[in-house]
Every structure is written in C-alpha cells, then in structure tokens.
Amino acid sequence: MLNSPIQTFLDELHLKFQPLKEGVLPNYIPELAKANPDWFGICVVTADGQIYQAGDCDQLFTIQSISKAFVYGMALEDRGRDYVLTRVGVEPTGDAFNSIQVDEVSKRPYNPMVNAGAIATTSLIKGIDPTERLNRMLDMFQRYVGRDLFVDMSVFTSERSTGHRNRAMAHLMLNFGMIEPNIDEALDLYFQQCSVMVNCQDLAVMAATLANCGINPISKARAVESRYVRNILTIMYTCGMYNFAGEWAYTVGLPAKSGVSGGIIAVAPHKMGIAVFSPLLDSHGSSVRGLKVCEEISEQFGLHLFDLRADIAREEGLGARG
Ligand code: GLU
C-alpha cells in the first residue's frame, strides 16, 4: 500500500462515513440478513495495478448482482453480440431490480442488470452440463480477480429455496420463448453466480480490469475480449444502478454496479476501479455508505465522464480544475 493522495483520501472517507448507520440489511434472502452492519471497506485499484484500501477489504461476502455485468461479458463471448441482443435488451427501466416486466413487443427482458435479464443472460452460458457451466463461470471470475473463488453454499441454498420471484420471472420468459426449457438449471447457475464469495479488493481488481480494457492490471491475464468491454460498461452506465441509474449518472458519472449484499463497483476508464463494501442498503438496494464514498471519490479526482474541466485545464496548461 502506498502513501499517496488517494490513500489519504480513502482513510478520510472511511473515518467520515463509518458512523453513518442509515439503511437496512436485506431480509428477502435470509442469509444476507446475518451480515454485520458495521462492515465497511473501500478499495481503489488503478489501471496500472496500484492498490489502495481502507477498512474491511478482506471480509468475504457474496458478489450478488455485481456478477451480472461480468456474466453479460461472458454471454457476449459465448454467443456473440447479435444473438445476445435477440434475448436481452439494452434499455434502462425505471423499475426496481426484481421487476417482473418484459418488453411488450419483443418480449425480451429490458436489460441484463435487472433480475429477469440477468437470468436470461445466464441461460446463454455454454457448457455440456451444469458442472461445466459453473466451472467456466468460476474460471471467468477468477481471471478478473486473479485468485481461486468458490460459491457459498448457505447463501446459494437460501436464495434457491426462497427465490420464488426469480423463478416466476424465468417461467414468464419461458412462456415467451425467451429462454430454453431447462429453467431450473439456469436458475441454479444464476443463484450460484450471485453466491460467489469475494472481498472488496477482489471487486476493485475486477473493476480495474474493465478500466484496463479487459486485462487484469495485476496478473496481466486477459479476462474478457476487449471488443465487449464497451458493451459491459455501457450497460453498467445506463442500467447498473437500477432505478437510481439516472441520478447516479448525473452525480457520479461512472459505469457502476451494485449488489444487494452491500458491494458497489465503479469504473473510471483508463484510470481506476473503485469498490466499496458496506451492507446497509437504501430503498433501491444499494449500499448507503457505498453511494456516498463513490460520489466523493468521483468529485475529488474529477472522474465524472463528462467533467471536461480537467481536460480543458490540461490543454490550457493551467494544471488544475477550474
Ligand atoms: N441474487 C439477488 C436476487 O436475485 C441479486 C439482487 C441484487 O444484488 O441486486 O434477488
């Protein structure tokens, strides 16, 4: 860990937001309600592999919906862009993550970040049987993270036995011919992908890998074909924060993805991956502390994609943001 303006700022943010106790633990997945509300980690990994962290960055938790962005990349690799687009749209919705809505005309789920679209996306992953599909998926996550990962069985079975709404969505999509008939296998794989255990540093490395056009900046392994990175980041930008995506784009201005276990990642292209972990959630299902931290990091380092002041200052030789 280096002593730098980034490190100092992360330490300050951690001190500032640790006392914030707003939000609630999710209880619709019983295992997630057991999280410690005080857990709080912040990690930044730069696109050239420097790691900065504050707080609980080694604490393991399930990746939940953050997995959706990466599995979307894998589906694009497995099936190609054109085919994936016939099964899952790219339109943001003003609806919550668990909305049971599909496009009335095309019958596609709206996008790969809401649960319906994510389940349809997962059903596109190739493999001769469930074991091969799961192993291929774990390999994919491992390339992003740079270490071995595993599925937490208690969260997986908790979600599998209570995920009636997700099951209903899968049946609806089967009714419209949008997914193949083996929906139990697709749902199991979806619940498994959500139950992969990561820590905050893993998530920051994953985000940094996207910031670095698909190459893990630490292991130097390619995690996803470079041509699909823009598709993943676009979907994260427009849909990653569900029905908060517009407000997030306005204030933070970075592609991002939140998960119901309290993780958030944000990607500053060519610059850094940011990850925050803190389990207390707001009404949109995003980490309360995570939102605040990302807002402040974006502002402090001028990361908003449409904040053109830094570029202008550089061009004019002013060396500062006006
Ligand atoms: N596994 C969760 C579900 O399907 C993911 C939701 C989330 O992380 O936003 O409900």
Image (cartoon, rainbow, N blue to C red):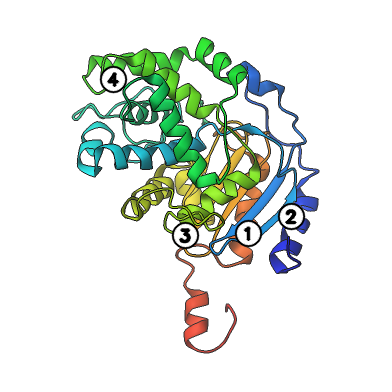
Characterize the local packing of mark 1: few (<14), some (14-19) or many (20 or more) Cα atoms within 10 angstroms.
some
> Does residue 253 appear anywhere in the picture?
no
Which one is in front, 70 or 239? 70
Residue 195 placement: quadrant:
top right
- Which residue is label 4 attached to? 173
- Which residue is label 3 attached to? 212
Residue at the image point whose x is 60% and y is 57% from the top: 45
Q: Please, what is the three-letter code of the amino acid marked with disc 1?
A: Ile
- Which residue is label 2 attached to? 13
Q: Could you give the CA–CA distance between mark 1 and mark 3, rounded to whole angstroms?
A: 19 Å
Q: Secondary structure at mark 2?
A: helix
Q: Please, what is the three-letter code of the amino acid marked with disc 4?
A: Met
CB of mark 2 within 8 Å of CB of mark 3? no
Q: Could you give the CA–CA distance between mark 1 and mark 2, rounded to whole angstroms?
A: 9 Å
Q: Please, what is the three-letter code of the amino acid marked with disc 3?
A: Asn
Name which of mark 2 and mark 3 comes first in the sequence.
2
Name which of mark 4 and mark 3 comes first in the sequence.
4
Characterize the local packing of mark 4: few (<14), some (14-19) or many (20 or more) Cα atoms within 10 angstroms.
many
Q: Could you give the CA–CA distance between mark 4 and mark 2, rounded to whole angstroms?
A: 43 Å
Can you say which quadrant of the picture contains the N terminus?
Answer: bottom right
Q: Position of residue 143 (x, y in %)?
A: 48, 45
Residue 106 placement: quadrant:
top left
Q: Which mark is residue 297?
A: 1
